[in-house]
Amino acid sequence: MIISTIILPVNAEDAEPTWVKRQLRAMWIATVVNIDWPSKTGLTKEEQQKEFLHNLDTAKLMNMNAVIVQISPTADAFYKSNIYPWSKYLSGTQGVDPGYDPLAFMIEEAHKRNLEFHAWLNPYRISMDTNLNGLVDNHPAKQHPEWVESYGGKLYFNPGIPAVRQHIQNVVKEVTAKYDVDAIHFDDYFYPYPVSGQDFPDADTFAQYGSGFTNKGDWRRNNVNLLVQEVAQAVKSTKPYVKFGISPFGIWKNKTTDPSGSDTAGSQSYYTIYADSRKWVKEEWIDYITPQIYWNIGLEVAAYDKLVPWWSEQVKGTKVQLYIGHASYKIAANNEAWNNPEELPNQLRLNMNYPEVKGSMFFSAKDFTIRNPLGIREKLANDLYRYPSLVPAMPHLDNQAPVAPELRAVLRWSNGVHLYWRDSDPTTTYFVLYRFPQGATIDLNDSTKMVDTVRKTGEFQAYLDKEADLSQKYTYAITAVDRLHNESAPKTSVIED
């Protein structure tokens, strides 16, 4: 990975962008209360699919390479499940079959566009209200009311019950086994965020299961830690190549509380939601972490430019990859920092100063597909995301690259340059196409020479490069890449007249 050593200038919009070859670029597609997709309940299958394809096409046009899709927002399913009922955010009524398998459709279409698909689940949240009777009769929460707690106007599975952890593992195993997901993803919802004057009602559970703990907070953190470890094991025992990542709240602890904490003064997830996110990194229980650093550069209580280096230090020396979660939803908010069209681009430029930062995720999709505040879609697509980028490889999961493909012909026609190649390696998942001026050094680290990434569909494939200047002479290179993004040596060919 080529990392820039630029120092962020005061007016970073005047800086030349530095493009990197490997950089996760993803957007969260939230389904809870129909935030991103479907736009409302009750749409037809065709309407739902059309909307989802718009999300994927937008991501592809912006040279993103992954989507993080919420497939179980409230102990329900956007997939054919033997555990959870169909989500009410599809039809408007829980348990109603949408007439197709949304997850199978979404994965297939994402992979056609060579986008990674991260299946995002909320492990503990059951419903956005407290009406247990409103759930379908075969819902696990209704069948096991002893697992359920009401808090803050919502229902949750009690994280302190061992049977709940096993249930969540079963949910994750079902998704991982049945579907071709690239990753399992949790966000920041563990124990619920605290409601003033109310403690989560688990005193009886602590009395029953808290042996060995004198402090309820330590016990709660241990419950979450056990879930993280066990889910990681469940994923890897099902499909070793599937990644497990978590996107926690952006502050672990403030350094005024713990010298190991960040130079911040905000809410501390270690205490508020019992998420010991730093420990997950140090113990290497997860493959990636995406802290939600949803604050602007220079914010006094939680500065973006202080949290990025802190998180970079936490992953240093571990196998855990660091991506940053960005608040695209705040762009053009009634706030001086977020009214600056360069706030988010400046954050991405700042990331380039830290080699540990391997990419970004944006919350959420509609900021690019519908809202497009301050023209952020074009700003990224034409500048920092101007060229394609590969998802960073994870050598601790796999470090064997496929065999190089056989580039059979490169032909100049009136409508562009046609490329034909053959690949018989079963580990190949996609191809990377490069275009160099004829006679130039073939440098695969030069992302500005990447034309496209193309999903493998068979042994013989073709591609039309419509952007090539037909008056120029080029050398093309092609590489094969596996599902964990290990890249082969290149095969090259010059244009034939």
Image: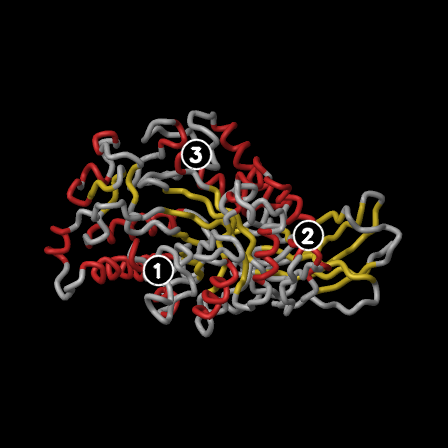
Q: Amino acid at mark 1?
A: Ala
183 or 190: nearer the viewer: 190
State the residue position of label 2.
383
Q: Is residue 285 left or right of residue 1?
A: left
User: Which quarter of the figure is the N terminus placed in?
Assistant: bottom right
The reply to whether callout 1 and callout 3 are in contact (CB within 8 Å) is: no
Compared to 55, does 9 lie above or below?
A: below
The tag earlier along the polypeptide, 1 or 2, is: 1
Q: Nearer the viewer, residue 461 or 382?
A: 382
Q: Position of residue 269 (x, y in %)?
A: 34, 57
Asked whether, in this view, residue 267 is left or right of residue 488, the answer is left
Q: Of tags 3 and 2, which is closer to the observer?
A: 2
Mark 1 against mark 2, which lies toward the viewer?
A: 2
Q: Secondary structure at mark 2?
A: helix
Secondary element type, mark 3: helix
Question: Of the numbered discs in the image, which one, if any, rests on residue 432?
Answer: none
- Measured Cα–Cα span from mark 1 to mark 3: 28 Å
Residue under label 3: 34
In the rendered view, tell whether residue 8 sits above or below residue 62. below
CA neighbours of label 1 inside 10 A, class few (<14), some (14 to 19), many (20+): many
The residue under the point 39% across, 54% down is 249
Q: Residue at x 30, y 54 (%)?
A: 272
Residue marked by disc 1: 232
Is 153 or 465 nearer to us in this picture?
153
Give the label, 1 or 3, closer to the camera.
3
Left or right relative to 16: residue 293: left
**Residue lying at 52% horizontally and 61% vertically, measured from the top left:** 305
Q: Amino acid at mark 3?
A: Asn
Residue in the picture at 37% in, 27% down: 92
Query: What is the spatial separation of the Cα atoms under label 3 and label 2, in whole angstroms?
Result: 31 Å
**Around disc 2, counting alpha carbons within 10 Å, would you say few (fewer than 14), some (14 to 19), or many (20 or more)?**
some
